[in-house]
Amino acid sequence: MKLSELMAGYTPDPEFTGYATNDDYVLAIDTGTSQDEDDYEVVEMGVAGLDAQMNPITQDKTYIRAGQSTQKTGTQRAFKVTGDRYIGDAAQDFLLSHKMKYGTGNSVIVPYVYFCILTGKGEKGRVSIIVNSDGSGNAGESSSIDIDLRKAGELPEEYTYTASLS
């Protein structure tokens, strides 16, 4: 599903206050055919878990008479996508394509947006696609997938979803 199709049913309110659930967050990726973010494919079909992680990078040092001190030196954004394989979903078919499973370097780096449907606020950046499992499980069970998407290159930028006028 394209981001514009998903968002046709939502009107984000930047002033929204209240609780959010994991279903209120959207991860969408450029599968190589997008002109803008509205054409990105939403990662949702068959996805049971979307774990958006902020992995801080720190350096610990011990100083005379001050003891141990921790300094944050960076953050590695990561998304862990788990669920069931759904053949025919554009996002899953792209993430689990031969090119992504066996690619390296720049060939597996794609743009993404991640934001809250309720407020429209989030981030956009670039991630490396790392396929850990393209289908596993026991006889009679659904075929499970496990994919990591990790920040690549520059820090993500702030992003606010707005519907395109086209």
Image (cartoon, rainbow, N blue to C red):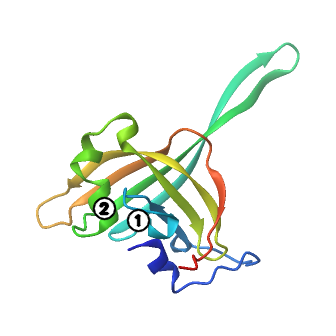
At label 1, the amino acid type is Val
Q: Position of residue 116 (x, y in %)?
A: 60, 69
Given residues 65 and 98, the one toward you in this image is: 98
At horizontal 29% and vertical 39% (from top left) the residue drawn is 103
As drawn, the label of residue 65 is: none
Which quadrant: the N terminus?
bottom left
Compute the Cα span from label 1 to label 2: 7 Å
Describe residue 71's horizontal placement relative to residue 135 as left or right: right
**Residue occupying the far left of the picture:** 139
What residue sits right under mark 1 in the picture?
43
As drawn, the label of residue 92 is: 2
Indicate the secondary structure of the residue bearing disc 2: helix
At horizontal 31% and vertical 66% (from top left) the residue drawn is 90
Corner quadrant of residue 42: bottom left
At label 2, the amino acid type is Gln
- Asked if marks 1 and 2 touch (Cβ < 8 Å), the reply is yes
Describe residue 5's horizontal placement relative to residue 75 as left or right: left
Corner quadrant of residue 163: bottom right
Describe residue 141's horizontal placement relative to residue 103 as left or right: left
Given residues 75 and 138, the one toward you in this image is: 75
At horizontal 52% and vertical 87% (from top left) the residue drawn is 9
Position of residue 10 relative to residue 76, above or below, is: below
**Residue occupying the far bottom of the picture:** 9
Position of residue 102 relative to residue 67, above or below, is: below
Position of residue 143 relative to residue 5, above or below, is: above
Given residues 37 and 140, the one toward you in this image is: 37
